[in-house]
Amino acid sequence: MAHIVHNSAKHAGDRLNIDIESVVNKIFSHFSSSAKRTEALKAVFAFVEEQYQVVRRHVPTRWLSLWPAVKRLHDSWTAIKSYFLSLGEDQCPKSLWQLFKDDEDGDGKPLELQVYLSFLNNVLKIFHDVVLLLEGEDGTVCK
Protein backbone atom coordinates (compact mmCIF):
# COMPACT_ATOMS: atom_id res chain seq x y z
CA MET A 1 0.00 0.00 0.00
CA ALA A 2 2.73 2.47 0.92
CA HIS A 3 4.32 1.82 -2.47
CA ILE A 4 1.09 2.80 -4.24
CA VAL A 5 0.81 6.02 -2.22
CA HIS A 6 4.45 6.86 -2.96
CA ASN A 7 4.01 6.18 -6.68
CA SER A 8 0.87 8.34 -6.76
CA ALA A 9 2.81 11.28 -5.34
CA LYS A 10 5.76 10.64 -7.68
CA HIS A 11 3.61 10.45 -10.81
CA ALA A 12 1.68 13.56 -9.81
CA GLY A 13 5.00 15.35 -9.32
CA ASP A 14 6.03 14.37 -12.83
CA ARG A 15 3.22 16.62 -14.12
CA LEU A 16 4.72 19.76 -12.57
CA ASN A 17 6.73 22.29 -14.57
CA ILE A 18 9.67 21.86 -12.17
CA ASP A 19 11.44 18.60 -11.39
CA ILE A 20 11.47 19.12 -7.64
CA GLU A 21 13.57 16.02 -6.95
CA SER A 22 16.28 17.34 -9.25
CA VAL A 23 16.13 20.84 -7.73
CA VAL A 24 16.37 19.48 -4.17
CA ASN A 25 19.35 17.31 -5.04
CA LYS A 26 21.08 20.03 -7.07
CA ILE A 27 20.84 22.47 -4.16
CA PHE A 28 22.01 19.79 -1.72
CA SER A 29 25.00 18.83 -3.88
CA HIS A 30 25.99 22.48 -4.28
CA PHE A 31 26.59 22.71 -0.53
CA SER A 32 27.58 19.14 0.34
CA SER A 33 30.67 19.27 -1.85
CA SER A 34 32.09 22.50 -0.41
CA ALA A 35 32.68 23.62 3.17
CA LYS A 36 33.34 27.13 1.82
CA ARG A 37 29.86 27.29 0.26
CA THR A 38 28.31 25.98 3.46
CA GLU A 39 30.05 28.73 5.44
CA ALA A 40 28.80 31.31 2.93
CA LEU A 41 25.26 29.97 3.35
CA LYS A 42 25.61 30.19 7.14
CA ALA A 43 26.60 33.83 6.73
CA VAL A 44 23.48 34.48 4.65
CA PHE A 45 21.32 32.81 7.31
CA ALA A 46 22.88 35.13 9.90
CA PHE A 47 22.32 38.15 7.63
CA VAL A 48 18.60 37.38 7.19
CA GLU A 49 18.41 36.63 10.93
CA GLU A 50 17.38 33.00 10.59
CA GLN A 51 18.86 30.00 12.33
CA TYR A 52 21.03 27.94 9.99
CA GLN A 53 19.56 24.62 8.91
CA VAL A 54 21.44 22.01 6.94
CA VAL A 55 20.10 21.50 3.41
CA ARG A 56 18.63 18.02 3.13
CA ARG A 57 19.08 15.48 0.38
CA HIS A 58 16.38 13.44 -1.31
CA VAL A 59 17.15 9.78 -1.96
CA PRO A 60 14.80 8.53 -4.70
CA THR A 61 14.75 4.99 -3.32
CA ARG A 62 13.61 6.24 0.10
CA TRP A 63 9.90 7.00 0.15
CA LEU A 64 10.06 9.38 3.07
CA SER A 65 12.98 11.62 2.08
CA LEU A 66 11.37 14.12 -0.33
CA TRP A 67 8.99 15.93 2.01
CA PRO A 68 11.63 16.68 4.70
CA ALA A 69 13.96 18.02 2.00
CA VAL A 70 11.21 20.18 0.45
CA LYS A 71 10.13 21.39 3.89
CA ARG A 72 13.69 22.42 4.75
CA LEU A 73 14.01 24.41 1.49
CA HIS A 74 10.59 25.96 2.04
CA ASP A 75 11.41 26.95 5.62
CA SER A 76 14.83 28.31 4.60
CA TRP A 77 13.63 29.99 1.42
CA THR A 78 14.79 33.54 2.20
CA ALA A 79 18.36 32.49 2.95
CA ILE A 80 18.59 29.96 0.10
CA LYS A 81 17.25 32.43 -2.45
CA SER A 82 19.51 35.22 -1.18
CA TYR A 83 22.55 32.95 -1.34
CA PHE A 84 22.02 31.93 -4.96
CA LEU A 85 21.13 35.45 -6.08
CA SER A 86 24.29 36.75 -4.40
CA LEU A 87 26.35 34.38 -6.54
CA GLY A 88 25.11 35.99 -9.71
CA GLU A 89 24.79 34.38 -13.10
CA ASP A 90 28.50 33.65 -13.50
CA GLN A 91 28.95 31.63 -10.29
CA CYS A 92 25.52 30.11 -9.73
CA PRO A 93 24.96 26.66 -11.31
CA LYS A 94 23.17 27.31 -14.59
CA SER A 95 20.18 25.07 -13.88
CA LEU A 96 19.60 26.81 -10.54
CA TRP A 97 20.17 30.29 -11.94
CA GLN A 98 17.30 29.69 -14.37
CA LEU A 99 15.03 29.23 -11.34
CA PHE A 100 16.31 32.19 -9.31
CA LYS A 101 17.17 34.80 -11.96
CA ASP A 102 13.64 36.20 -12.25
CA ASP A 103 13.98 37.66 -8.76
CA GLU A 104 17.38 39.23 -9.39
CA ASP A 105 15.88 42.72 -9.15
CA GLY A 106 14.27 41.82 -5.81
CA ASP A 107 10.77 42.93 -6.77
CA GLY A 108 9.25 40.59 -4.19
CA LYS A 109 7.05 38.55 -6.55
CA PRO A 110 7.05 34.87 -5.63
CA LEU A 111 9.19 32.81 -7.96
CA GLU A 112 7.73 29.75 -9.64
CA LEU A 113 10.04 27.59 -7.50
CA GLN A 114 8.83 29.31 -4.33
CA VAL A 115 5.20 28.64 -5.27
CA TYR A 116 5.95 24.98 -5.99
CA LEU A 117 7.82 24.62 -2.69
CA SER A 118 4.85 26.05 -0.80
CA PHE A 119 2.43 23.77 -2.63
CA LEU A 120 4.57 20.65 -2.27
CA ASN A 121 5.36 21.37 1.36
CA ASN A 122 1.64 20.97 2.09
CA VAL A 123 0.75 18.20 -0.35
CA LEU A 124 3.78 15.98 0.26
CA LYS A 125 3.17 16.19 4.01
CA ILE A 126 -0.15 14.41 3.46
CA PHE A 127 1.49 11.64 1.44
CA HIS A 128 4.33 11.44 3.98
CA ASP A 129 1.89 10.98 6.86
CA VAL A 130 -0.11 8.34 4.98
CA VAL A 131 3.04 6.34 4.19
CA LEU A 132 4.10 6.55 7.85
CA LEU A 133 0.67 5.34 8.91
CA LEU A 134 0.76 2.45 6.44
CA GLU A 135 4.25 1.44 7.50
CA GLY A 136 3.42 1.66 11.20
CA GLU A 137 2.74 -1.43 13.25
CA ASP A 138 -0.41 -0.16 14.91
CA GLY A 139 -2.30 0.91 11.78
CA THR A 140 -5.63 -0.79 11.15
CA VAL A 141 -7.93 -0.96 8.16
CA CYS A 142 -10.36 1.35 9.96
CA LYS A 143 -7.80 4.13 10.46
Image: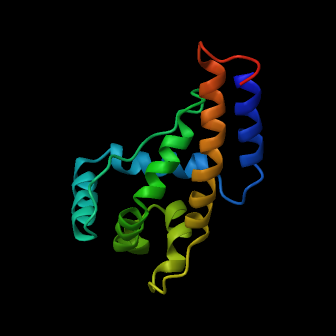
Q: Nearer the viewer, residue 38 or 142?
A: 142
Question: In this picture, is 116 found above or below 14?
Answer: below
The structure residue drawn at horizontal position 24% and vertical position 60%, both measured from the top left corner, is 40
Looking at the rendering, in which quadrant would you find the N terminus? top right
- Residue extending farthest to the front is 142
Quarter of image, res 127 = top right
Q: Where does residue 139 sit, x and y in percent of width and height?
A: 65, 18
Quarter of image, res 130 = top right
Residue 38 placement, left or right of 25: left
The structure residue drawn at horizontal position 70% and vertical position 24%, both measured from the top left corner, is 2
Looking at the rendering, in which quadrant would you find the C terminus? top right
Q: Where does residue 42 sit, x and y in percent of width and height?
A: 24, 57
- Residue extending farthest to the top is 137
Q: Nearer the viewer, residue 130 or 115?
A: 130
Residue 58 placement, left or right of 54: right
Q: Where does residue 129 sit, x and y in percent of width and height?
A: 60, 34
Q: Nearer the viewer, residue 135 or 31?
A: 135
The structure residue drawn at horizontal position 71% and vertical position 60%, both measured from the top left corner, is 17
Q: Nearer the viewer, residue 119 or 137?
A: 137
Question: In this picture, is 119 found above or below 103?
Answer: above
The structure residue drawn at horizontal position 72% and vertical position 40%, both measured from the top left corner, is 9
Question: In this picture, is 82 found above or below 17?
Answer: below
